[in-house]
Image (spheres, helix red, strand yellow):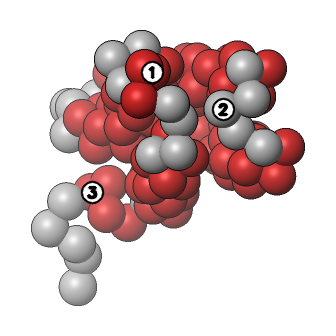
Amino acid sequence: MASKFRFYDLDVWRKAIEYANDVYDVTGRFPDGERFGLTSQLRRASVSISSNIAEGSGRSTNRDFARFVEIAYGSTMETVSQLGIALKRDYVSRPGFERPTQIADDLARMLSGLRKSLQP
């Protein structure tokens, strides 16, 4: 039996949920002064990845879906850059940086593959 929502069946969507969860864990240890700065930005960008996959999967054409996948890819890159800033600021340890960036690398490859599969 198929899932109620198309995106439920996508491994990339599940990986994006895992990634957002990791980002929440990492940012939970950031300084309080970053609550409305880097913490908020990282969390919003990480949530945007799975949200864009879900929204795109509901579009009527693969071309539209591919556009949302591109946006999700961009949000992935945004979070990696922001994690780099957090590492430089000592908000996150090297191991705390490496786990989410490895997931982001996997996620980026999966998003690229999905985007290619949606193109004619």
The 10 Å Cα crowd at callout 3, few under 14, some 14 to 19, many 20 or more, is few
Residue 64, above or below 8? above
The 10 Å Cα crowd at callout 1, few under 14, some 14 to 19, many 20 or more, is few
Residue 65: x and y in percent read 36, 30
Relative to the observer, which residue lies in front, 34 or 46? 34
Which residue ends up furthest to the right in the rendered image? 94
Asked whether residue 118 appears in the rendered view, the answer is: no
Q: Earlier in the sequence, mark 3 or mark 1?
A: 3
Could you tell me the amino acid type at mark 2?
A: Tyr
User: Label 3 belongs to which residue?
Assistant: 6
Q: Residue at x 42, y 20 (%)?
A: 33
Q: Which mark is residue 34?
A: 1
Asked which quadrant contains residue 105, the reply is top right
Relative to the observer, which residue lies in front, 36 or 9? 36
Q: CA distance from mark 3 to mark 1?
A: 36 Å
Could you tell me the amino acid type at mark 1?
A: Glu
